[in-house]
Amino acid sequence: MSSPAPPAVDHLLRLADDELILGWRDSEWTGIAPFLEEDVAFSSIAQTEIGHARAFYELAARELGGTADELAFDRRPEEYRSSPLVELRLVHDWGRTIARHVLYELADAIRIAEVKGSPDPDVAGLGEKIEREEAYHRMHAQMWADRLAESEEGRKRLVAGLEELWPYALGLLEGEARERLTADVAERLPFFTPPEVEPVERGEHVDEWAALWEEMTMVRRSAPGGQW
Amino acid sequence: MAVWEVFRQEREGQPFQHGGSLEAPNREFADAYAREFYGRRDESFALWIVPREAVLEVREPYVAPVFDRDYRRVDGYSIKVKLKEARELAGTPSG
Amino acid sequence: MTPRTEEAFIEHVQSGGQVEATDWMPDEYRARLVKFIEMHGNSELMGVLPEREWILRAPTLQRKLALTAKVQDEAGHAQLIYRVVEDLGKPRDAVLEDLISGKSKFHNVFHYPTKTWGDVGVIAWLVDAAAIISQKALLKCSYAPYARIMKKICWEESFHILHGRDVILAMVTGTPKQRELVQEALDRWWKPLMMFHGNQIPAEKDPMFHWRIKSQGNEEARQQFLDGYVPQIRELGLEIPDPKLRKDEATGRWAYTEPDWDELRHVVTGHGPMTAERLGFRRASRDETAWVRDVVLAEAA
């Protein structure tokens, strides 16, 4: 698995890793969201992200061999293609969590539209299916952003999160998709003006990454050759 | 925080039944949470989400009428004996 | 509509009558309901914690999804149950404050640590099995709003036990190390499981039975658990750590080593191995998100 993957597979792995790691981070909120109704809602979002990751890994496994689980859990930490945005540990800070949520969903909408246009019918078909669930994610993210922005305290915290995470959100995408994201963010989040910044590019992992990988793979590593 | 009552329709065409209640600050949140609580297992076809204060409850003993109103019910009509008599008068065979 | 004297009310519930939220009810009935249902809600909420950290460690995508869904259900059930308590007159904030300050209780099993993935399987299989026995008996609760949500809860939880049993089956058919993890977990959990349904108070002396909040006695529930699950555990070649455990074929009753009821009391009054840490975690995470509730749950402007 250490030889470089062809571009199409590499793209699938980027999508899969982003969804897996975001789902992992979102599931850190399970049971401790600001209130119980939200616990249930946010957990569903974490579950669909993991479900999407699995579907992307399955497509990548057509080329790379192995299983979705092996791709998700048995690579070395440096082999993951996840973007720094999804790796950041934000648990307990709901303002930054919603900032990441809304930025990710807006960026992901652009990306999934590209996936739907893929010449590979399996990839395009998966894009269609994912889009249906992501539409709910966007509604949820927008609902939260709007509600936070209605109060002074909420807006202050949300905007601080958006400012901090904006360079990371740009790094999720490439080329002109970044300009589209800037325009979409300005339209959907009128209380926030995206500053001109250097994107935090994919490739380097954030400081918290090592600990995440350790925890995510610890049970699997504890009994090599085991079945789970 | 507002309480919302959720009514769910299990399959298209069926009557709506009360599912339960939840708390949400506005209609958007109530919508999202109702879908989670009553739809995440694909158990509902449609939902009605109603602010609790919009529900008017009326209960016994003020629901059912006090006096017998057997003329509204099927068991209020005993036609067997009368039918037999009518048939005998008409000379038609009894069924 | 319920009768308006305590005597007639008791007769009403004891002969199978039900009570709605807006009905008249004796103060004692309301107080007992609140306490009992609140503890049930607390247990669902605290039951999230022993499993939640293992969501992050789940060894396959399928297990991760199933465990997340299970913990999500528990949070959802806490919400359903707390709503019943709220409609009986105790606000959610007060319920959570009493939980965090140690004033109210939660089930003994959620005071213990989850050491390995084997524990995750044992909890999902056997703790949930014990819980579902109690919850099924509550379908007949005299308080109708509680009985109604119990129907939803039992239906939703039906996959939890299967998920747990499947985790255990995968491990006992895996490597010797994995099998060992399961046996060790069973050794750790057996005593708390035997305490789960409470001491052997006869049903007719149990005030919860008197008011028909509960419809079955503690020992009856435990016997049902043993009947259902001892054979399932043994058929996997696992050893139950109780030399006295055996079924008397003549009476159909299980004999077992008397659980240490002092330990149970000690644990549920806030002195379990994980009580302080878990309540501290709850308090900290609740404090961190207090601002969200302040700004978001405030009445719409």
Image (cartoon, rainbow, N blue to C red):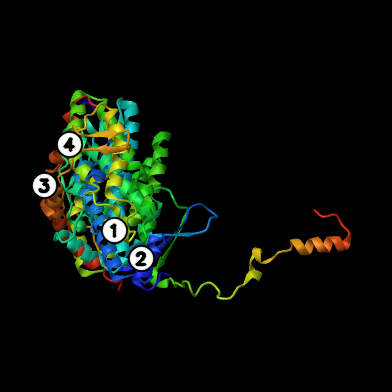
Q: Earlier in the sequence, mark 1 or mark 2?
A: 2
- Mark 3 secondary-structure assignment: loop
A138 on left or right of A84: right
Q: Earlier in the sequence, mark 2 or mark 4?
A: 2
- Report the residue at 23% width, 43% height from top: A24
- Report the residue at 42% width, 72% height from top: B54
Q: Are marks 1 and 2 in contact (CB under 8 Å)?
A: no
Residue mark closest to the camera, 3 vs 1 = 1
Residue mark closest to the camera, 2 vs 3 = 2
**Which residue position holds label 4?**
C116
- Residue C269 image offset from top left, x and y in percent: 14, 55
Which amino acid, mark 2?
Ile
Up-down: is C44 above or below C12?
above
For the residues labelled 4 and 1, the Cα–Cα distance comes to 36 Å
Q: Is residue A7 visible?
A: no
Q: Earlier in the sequence, mark 3 or mark 1?
A: 1
**Which residue position holds label 3?**
C273
Q: Is A216 in front, or is C193? A: C193
**Which residue position holds label 2?**
C10
**Badge 4: chain ID:** C
For the residues labelled 3 and 1, the Cα–Cα distance comes to 28 Å
**Badge 1: chain ID:** C
- Report the residue at 27% width, 60% height from top: C207
Quadrant for the C terminus of chain C in the image:
bottom left
Q: Is A21 in front, or is B76? A: B76
